[in-house]
Amino acid sequence: MGEQAVALARAVKYSSAGTVEFLVDSKKNFYFLEMNTRLQVEHPVTECITGLDLVQEMIRVAKGYPLRHKQADIPINGWAVECRVYAEDPYKSFGLPSIGRLSQYQEPLHLPGVRVDSGIQPGSEISIYYDPMISKLISYGSDRTEALKRMEDALDNYVIRGVTHNIALLREVIINSRFVKGDISTKFLSDVYPDGFKGHKLTNSERNQLLAIASSLFVAFQLRAQHFQGPSRVPIVKPNMTSWELSIKLHDEVHTVVASNSGSTFSVEVDGSKLNVTSTWNLTLPLLSVNVDGTQRTIQCLSREAGGNMSIQFLGTVYKVHILTKVAAELNKFMLEKVAEDTSSVLHSPMPGVVVAISVKPGDVVAEGQEICVIEAMKMQNSMTAGKTGKVKSVRCKAGDTVGEGDLLVELE
């Protein structure tokens, strides 16, 4: 490939940095695809394994200076991996755009072998009119295994709040056995996730770890509440409690948990298994390093509500758990649950964007899967289809309208 790329550049007398792209088949035959007269976003991978600053070399050549290196001078050391971190929702067609303002942003630059190329800062606004890329996250190691492990740690330690991002999907890809072995193709996502991306599938051990961490967090917040200054009219937690009986709901399953603490360690009994959870329990930090029976995990508590709802980013995926004390859980059974909306007769916008075209009008009969309208966001057009066969009752938008995520577009009878 390298020889063909150089031959092509020489044939057209090209004298700057450029990128030649090829397609490779199952027999490792390769075919020319295109050439871009610039560096690609993957150039940090080359820089990591060669030690060259390609941007500096490009600027020098543009100024008229000769190259300072010959091909024989360029080493290849180690392995590098790059993830494109995007403001996209991976649960919607592997990545429909997300917009918003970054309320909190912290890059994992404290980790060894990690590089981040980004111009993003806290408060930056992600708009439907621009590229959704947040950053290029690069990890480097002595071999592929080390590079992938460092990328896994980097994704766990990346703090992005305010917009939906694709870290969950990136993390699942790099730990997938097929990807680790290099058994990949352009059909990788559709082959591995034929029903769409659903997030990390917890093993029984991982589920118990998550439940133990969630219950420890719940108790840690309760203990912190004891130290509020000033008189409290309603005691939040009984003083001198040594153990807590909790009810935790995860994935529609309810688990009974008993937690007790001794200093910075919580002893948690989950479904008959006993786990020890240790941390600094500094609840003001966006990242929390937790040790569960010798296994180190980095988690993020994204939100916590007084009603018991808590969102925890664990192994890249955000899990929603509902935690109550045993007494509160018994009383909660008498609370009415909100009935889920029947969405088969309505079409909501799955993302913010601009309506490019409307394909139906009131009175039209549409078939399930038929295109209803097209929405453009982040320079991509997305076809919105009918969820069932029926007659169009009303059209709530027109071409040129700007719509938000969840806005009603079309109603069916």
Image (cartoon, rainbow, N blue to C red):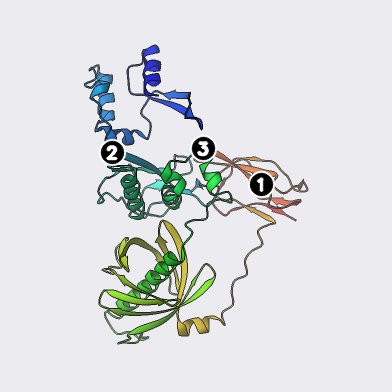
Of residue 105 and residue 129, the one placed in the foreground of this image is 105
Mark 3 neighbour class, 10 Å CA radius: few under 14, some 14 to 19, many 20 or more: few
Inspect the image, locate mark 2, and give the three-letter code of the amino acid beneath it.
Answer: Gly
Q: Measure how far apart labels 1 and 3 are at the Cα level.
A: 25 Å
- Identity of the residue drawn at 27% across and 82% down: 230
Kind of element beneath mark 3: loop
The quarter of the picture where the N terminus appears is top left
Q: Position of residue 128 (x, y in %)?
A: 48, 43
Q: Position of residue 110 (x, y in %)?
A: 24, 51
The quarter of the picture where the C terminus appears is bottom right
Location of residue 224 with respect to 43 vertically, above or below = below
Which residue is the site of mark 1? 385
Q: Is residue 244 left or right of residue 93?
A: left
Of residue 83 and residue 342, the one placed in the foreground of this image is 83
Which residue is the site of mark 3? 186
Asked if disc 2 and disc 1 are in contact, CB closer than 8 Å, the reply is no
Which comes sooner in the sequence, label 2 or label 1? 2
Which comes sooner in the sequence, label 3 or label 2? 2
Is there any visible trace of residue 353 in the rendered image? no
| 1 vs 3, front mark | 3
Location of residue 97 with respect to 259 vertically, above or below = above
Which residue is the site of mark 2? 78
Q: Is residue 269 left or right of residue 400?
A: left
- Identity of the residue drawn at 40% across and 19% down: 4
